[in-house]
Image (tube, grey):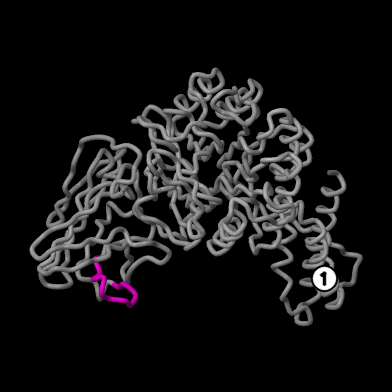
Amino acid sequence: MQNSSMQKKGTKRIALSFAALLMLSSGGTAFAAETTPVPVSAVSGTALTYEFTGVDAGKAGYAEGTLSLSSATDATYHLYWSNNAGALGGYYPIATLNVGAGKTESFSFGYHTAIPADATKVIAVNASLTDYPSVETASAVFDIPVGKRLGYSSNDALYTFNSFSDIHIDEEHFGDTPAYWWEYSEAHWAQALNYATSLNVDFIVSSGDQVTNAKLANLDKEWKAYQLILSQSDYVNPIYESGGNHEVRQDDAVSYELQAFINGTGLDGSMGTMSAAKPYYSVTEPNTGDLFIFMALEGGYRPAKYDEFTDEQLNWVENLLKNNYGKGKNIYIIQHALIKGYGPGDDLTNPYYGGAIDMSLPSAQRFIGLLEEYKDVVWISGHSHEAFELGYNFTDNNGAACSMIHNPSIGNPTHVTDGALDYAFNENLSQGYYVQTFKDAILFNGANICDQKIYPSYCYIIDGKTSAQKQAAKPVKLYKDVNVTADMMRSVIANTNTVLGLYYEYSSYDQYQALKKCYYQYKNANFDAMNNEELLTAYSKLKSGIATLHEIASAK
């Protein structure tokens, strides 16, 4: 799809004149276009232009608009986001255009699509070239005006995270751990963790349906498979999950299933939260104070029929919003099921998906009221599995609600065949977001996890509300009465590896991930070259981490 946004908004069209200085106003901030004439044609007879359109045409980082490429000869071109050297790594082409001699072809970005943080240009490269697509070898180059560039590099992000959903570890057809139903879900979960590791994200959030829970007898095995894959990955940072309808798929065992979700995920990792036995919780991002609210479906497997949110849960959410909104922080609500006919995740006029929350239910009406009252919140959902290509990824309901993002599925993104969702399994397709948080902008970069590449059309920008806050480093409790030697360090490293294997069922707990991260920090260290202070610090970190994890495991 060329226009990937769920909705088109506004009729304002602004064609930027790049031969003169043009001032564009956005929220009181003026942007100046470059005076250098563009487009720049690298090959005679080709030209690339970009007309920014929509109500956000004057705002930095907003990509909505139309790229147009003309050619003097018949040729096929790939369009790429580019820095000053060449195409940005980790991205698919923006588009591939077949242009006839003397003709012009175009490609349009939709509402709230994003210009990448590192992009300074768009380049058109002849598809016959197989080398790295560079500015030097481009057939045409468009210089993004300074006022339209985001103004940040990726290195300026205050923090990053992956947003995933619908992993669907499934033990229905196999009794062993791990199993292989939802045919590629386990491989895709491992790939998602590999992607998170390669990006070095600060944490992962999941919008629910970590497991499939087709049979209650297999629920424990599914959580173990989920945790085993996590424990065996190289990912070492926190992971936080919300509860989906598959977490409570057996309607006559909801209390048991919710407790399994609490035990399996560890929620925020604190004993107090877990002991409260509530499947919902919040997490504060330590470097900014940004708030992440994780909700859970409590009514049972059928969101279309049940009031999924208790009054107690909605009171809790509303109090968090009242106490934190408008105080210089981003607020995210991570919640599983989309609402029928409202927000992203499905076709609003011809629904394909029958399992969404019925918006007429009292709890749904109250939840919608919160989304419309607190418009600077970001709501992240999942549930329908619908792939990015269907275009139901982002909306703010024409400004009537908060920014709403839909996750497809790690386990199995779906498409539409003959008017219905097609659940055919695809080994090479797994989709989620890589999210970058800057001081005044949030970028949700839609990616194919299998390829570890970002789709330019499915990247969305949301105005940010945060800033970095200085955090005091937590002191290490030192084992000062111990004379640590290199051999002792080798021994404690081996012991840590054993403990991580024994306690893999706690791999989604913060305590497990912290110990695993510490293990990765020291496992290949040259202990013979470390001084006494370094040995004592390393030993104390590992011994304390083992003790903390053992305490959690013993309590559960």
The answer to whether residue 551 is above or below residue 340 is below
Q: Residue at x 32, y 65 (%)?
A: 82
Dot 1: element: helix
Residue identified by numbered label 1: 494
Residue placed furthest toward the right: 481
Q: Residues within 10 Å of mark 1 (few under 14, many from 20)?
A: few
Residue 300 location, quadrant: top right
Q: Is residue 300 left or right of residue 102?
A: right
Q: Which residues are magenta?
A: 124-134
Picture quarter with the C terminus: top right
Foreground residue among 73 and 315: 73
Q: Is residue 489 left or right of residue 231?
A: right
Residue 51 position within the rendered picture, expressed as x and y whole percent measured from the top left: 19, 50
The answer to whether residue 277 is above or below residue 367 is below
Q: Can residue 388 be spotted in the picture?
A: yes
Q: Residue at x 80, y 72 (%)?
A: 535
Foreground residue among 18 and 65: 65
Please state which amino acid type lies under the numbered disc 1: Ala
